[in-house]
Image: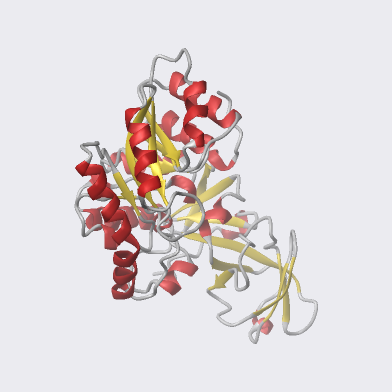
């Protein structure tokens, strides 16, 4: 029996740096997500973490039919793979609006929707729909404290919601409320933070209902907070990182029972000094937007990053003597979502063998519609 779940018997055949995926662990994460949500109809998982058609199919096989994404390329990938309900949770402007409309025309059996957070966008959408035979479904994006996109809950948010709902060329899709700023480590503290952040949102919903306006969907949260939102049956859930998990979330949220399902394989390519290793794990292979440590190495529990550049990661570690140039080292990315986008293909590991690859189809941003 292997002492570790992540190692490859054929590692000498795999060029590094490489991203390894473990389908059995991915399947467990999907099952755990379903267990939290109770029913698949409440789930609208975010595909930004993986961008891979095979993983869309794994969700479809488990009855999950709704998806959320951030780019038009991701939306096209979902549609081409068989997903029928697709939310682009990102403001669209200029050429992106035209491409969105063309996606709707190219995939008429799919239900597309996107976000709006300002009244000025309504006229632009209506102009792009001139002559079209269909309506665009828009969800009002609510800022509950993230401070990124969205409109703060209140009268202006209600006015925007009502304007979309009454527009002859638009269709109101509901509310989208992402609370990525809520990162308290304990579940109890996350519950309290969510309750506080959502109190104004609850008041907005009461105002919408009092006006007799429809609320087709209420989408809440990401991976850290969706177990909190799962306690409210009216809320749909949109986690993303749960599919692979990563070291950042595993460290911050020890209460969440998801398994690491994506591992980086790299190699020692030089030993500049006795206690220093140079690895082939540069910015082009591991997400580098965060401070170090950007990866947790199984074989090197303690290290200091000395430099990090396009193709190299130089580290100092107490156990450097046990490694020689050419040795393989395995690690968990601190942030998996942008790491996945750096790899054109990922290796699929079954029974400690990496024998096939999946293409990260939606890592590109341009689409051919």
> Viewer-proximal residue, 21 or 290?
290
Q: Residue at x 72, y 84 (%)?
A: 275
Q: Where is residue 40 in the image (x, y as percent from the top left)?
A: 24, 45
Question: Residue at the front extreme?
Answer: 155
Quadrant assignment, res 104? top left
Q: Position of residue 67 (x, y in %)?
A: 37, 41
> Viewer-proximal residue, 180 or 128?
128
Left or right of 49? Residue 308 is: right
Quadrant assignment, res 133? top left
* Circle count: 0
Left or right of 65? Residue 129 is: right
Q: Where is residue 153 in the image (x, y as percent from the top left)?
A: 37, 52
Instruction: Name above or below for residue 284 compared with residue 252.
Output: above
Coloring basis for residues: secondary structure
Left or right of 65? Residue 80 is: right
Q: Residue at x 63, y 63 (%)?
A: 266
Instruction: Name above or below for residue 275 compared with residue 128.
Output: below
Q: Residue at x 36, y 52 (%)?
A: 154
Q: Can residue 83 be seen in this view?
A: no
> Viewer-proximal residue, 2 or 169?
169
Question: Residue at the bottom extreme?
Answer: 318
Instruction: Name above or below for residue 34 compared with residue 267.
Output: above
Q: Can residue 294 be seen in this view?
A: yes
In which quadrant is the N terminus drawn? bottom left
Quadrant assignment, res 309? bottom right
> Viewer-proximal residue, 78 or 24?
78
Q: Where is residue 222 in the image (x, y as percent from the top left)?
A: 39, 56
In which quadrant is the C terminus drawn? top right
Left or right of 164? Residue 35 is: left
């Amino acid at each position: 029996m292997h002492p570790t779940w992540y190692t490859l018997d054929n590692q000498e055949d795999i060029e590094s740096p490489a991203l390894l995926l473990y389908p059995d662990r991915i399947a467990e994460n999907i099952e755990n997500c379903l267990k939290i949500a109770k029913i698949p109809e409440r789930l609208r998982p975010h595909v930004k973490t993986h961008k891979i058609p095979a993983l869309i199919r794994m969700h479809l096989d488990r009855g999950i039919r709704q998806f959320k994404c951030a780019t038009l390329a991701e939306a096209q990938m979902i549609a081409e793979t068989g997903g029928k309900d697709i939310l682009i949770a990102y403001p669209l402007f200029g050429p992106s609006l035209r491409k969105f409309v063309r996606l709707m025309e190219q995939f008429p059996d799919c239900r597309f929707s996107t976000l709006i957070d300002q009244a000025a966008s309504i006229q632009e959408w209506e102009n792009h729909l001139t002559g079209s035979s269909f309506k665009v479904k828009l969800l009002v994006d609510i800022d509950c404290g993230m401070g990124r996109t969205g409109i703060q809950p209140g009268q202006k948010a209600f006015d925007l919601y009502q304007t979309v709902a009454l527009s002859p060329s638009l269709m109101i899709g509901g509310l989208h409320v992402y609370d990525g700023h809520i990162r308290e480590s304990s579940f109890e503290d996350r519950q309290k933070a969510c309750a506080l952040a959502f109190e104004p949102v609850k008041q907005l919903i009461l105002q919408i209902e009092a006006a007799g306006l429809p609320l087709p969907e209420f989408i809440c949260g990401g991976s850290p907070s969706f177990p909190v939102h799962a306690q409210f049956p009216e809320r749909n859930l949109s986690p993303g990182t749960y599919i692979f998990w990563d070291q950042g979330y595993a460290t911050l949220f020890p209460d969440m029972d998801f398994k690491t399902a994506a591992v980086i394989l790299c190699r020692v390519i030089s030993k500049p000094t006795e206690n220093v290793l140079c690895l082939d794990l540069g910015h082009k292979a591991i997400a580098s937007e965060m401070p170090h440590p950007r990866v947790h190495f199984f074989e090197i529990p303690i290290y200091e990053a000395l430099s990090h550049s396009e193709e190299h990661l130089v580290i100092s570690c107490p156990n450097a003597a046990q490694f020689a140039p050419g040795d393989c080292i395995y690690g968990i990315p601190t942030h998996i979502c942008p790491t996945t986008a750096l790899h054109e293909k990922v290796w699929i590991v079954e029974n400690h063998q990496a024998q096939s690859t999946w293409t990260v189809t939606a890592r590109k941003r341009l689409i051919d519609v």
